[in-house]
Image (spheres, helix red, strand yellow):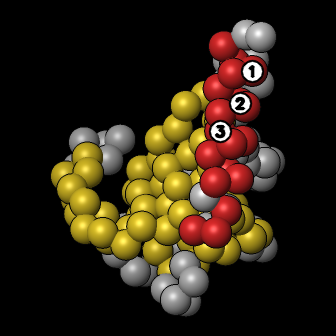
Amino acid sequence: MGFQTLVANLVGTANTITASLQDTVTHEAWAATDADGVRTYATGVSLSGVVIYRQEAIRTDEGQDITSPAKIVIVGPVTATGTPATRNEPIDTRDRFTLPDGAIHPVELVKGVVNPDTGAPYQITVFLGDEG
């Protein structure tokens, strides 16, 4: 058994163990930005993840220090959206999520451990920004 298989199996076990803690969130993938800077999004898709509501200081990929009000830990792979080619898959910092309480939050930072065999993350942690 290779390392990638071991990690994938452990993530699968973690997904099973945390199943009762997971909520359904809606992921809307960024599709385009018009000339006025208004973003459009693909149709939302439901994902399961552990939603943690806790103020947490983070540094974005652009080097900005902000406070994230919540994060989502998605245990397991997420399917790439395929729209458009300039986005980071499967979750881009231009995407947004709707949480179980109905609040819509932009994505500020995405972290994950990538499987070198597939190029897809084993698990993803999405740090959210203030409601938008």
Q: Type of residue at label 2?
A: Ala
Q: Is residue 75 above or below residue 23?
A: above
Residue at figure coordinates x 41%, y 57% from the top left: 127
Q: Position of residue 94 (x, y in %)?
A: 53, 58
Residue 52 sits in which quadrant?
bottom left
Circle 3 — which element?
Answer: helix
Horizontally, is 75 left or right of 111 in the view? Answer: right
Q: Residues within 10 Å of mark 1 (few under 14, many from 20)?
A: few
Q: Which residue is mark 1?
A: 5
Q: Give me the residue at 68% from left, 42% from top.
A: 13
Q: Residue at coordinates 37% horizontally, 72% vertically from top-left?
A: 53
Is residue 64 left or right of 95 when viewed as pictured? left
Q: Position of residue 74 (x, y in %)?
A: 60, 54
Q: CA distance from mark 1 to mark 3?
A: 10 Å
Residue 84 shows in the view: no
* Residue assigned mark 2: 8
Q: How dense is the environment of label 2, judged by Cα within 10 Å: few (below 14), some, or many (20 and up)?
A: some
Kindly state the secondary structure of the residue where label 1 is placed.
helix
| Residue bearing mark 3 | 11
| In front of the other: 43 or 23 | 23
The answer to whether the residues at label 3 and label 2 have Cβ atoms under 8 Å apart is: yes
Circle 3: residue type: Val
Q: Is mark 2 in CB contact (under 8 Å) with mark 1? A: yes
